[in-house]
Amino acid sequence: MVHNPVNWFELYVQDLPRAKAFYETVLGIELAPLPLPDGEQGLEMVGFPMDPEAPGSGGALIHVPGVPSGGTGTMIYFSCQDCAVEEARVTNAGGSVERPKMAIGDYGFVSVIKDPDGNLVGLHSLQ
């Protein structure tokens, strides 16, 4: 079976409405509530737009009482047309720019940002 190595991601957050507004503002997208397994108490999730026919990974923001946010062990990069555009929205949306747009050779450009919950995420573009 041939597949991409990542098929799902979750960003843990403490304030789901705030995180939803941040990512919708920065990425210019709309996140939608996801159905939860029966009997789950306190768990909340909103999903990033997904197209099962498109390459890449789906994912969600998730709030689980007692689970911290802001881990630094994994970096998720969001695809952009020009990461400088999304980077310019970060501060007004409540986050911070940790590394402004920089060239990564033949692979395009990246920016590293921090969301209001302390999660470091990347923005990637070819231009």
Image: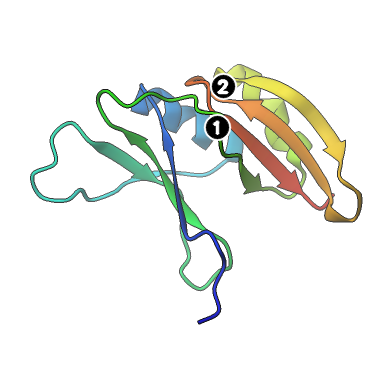
Examine the rendering and report whether any part of residue 76 can be seen: yes
* Residue 13 drawn above or below residue 58: above
- Which element type, helix, strand or loop, lies under badge 2? helix
Residue occupying the point 55% across, 79% down: 2
Which residue has dot 1 on it?
A: 25
Nearest to N terminus: mark 2 or mark 1? 1
Please, what is the three-letter code of the amino acid marked with disc 1?
Thr
Determine crowd level at label 1: few under 14, some 14-19, many 20+ residues with C-alpha closer than 10 A.
Answer: some
Q: What residue is drawn where x is 65% and y is 28%?
A: 113
Q: Which of the 4 image quadrants contains residue 64?
A: top left
Q: Is residue 76 above or below residue 55?
A: above
> Residue 33's spot in the image, x, y percent?
30, 44
Real-space CA distance between mark 2 and mark 1, rounded to the nearest whole angstrom: 6 Å
Disc 1, SS? helix
Task: Specify whether 28 is left or right of 34.
Answer: right
> For residue 93, which numbered disc appears in the image?
2
At label 2, the amino acid type is Ala
Disc on res. 61: none
Q: Residue furthest left?
A: 39
Q: Quick one: 106 or 25, which is closer to the camera?
A: 106
Farthest residue to the front: give it: 73
User: Residue 106 in the image: x percent, y percent?
Assistant: 90, 56
In the figure, 35 relative to 114: above or below? below
Residue 49 visible from this viewpoint? no
Picture quarter containing residue 74? Answer: top right
The crowding category of the residue bearing disc 2, from other C-alpha atoms within 10 Å (few below 14, some 14 to 19, many at least 20), is some
Q: Is residue 125 left or right of residue 96?
A: right
Q: Position of residue 8 (x, y in %)?
A: 45, 55
Q: Measuring 50% from the left and 82% from the top, which residue is drawn there?
A: 1
The x and y percentages for residue 46 are 35, 42
Kindly indicate whether the residue at mark 1 contacts the one at mark 2 (C-beta within 8 angstroms): yes
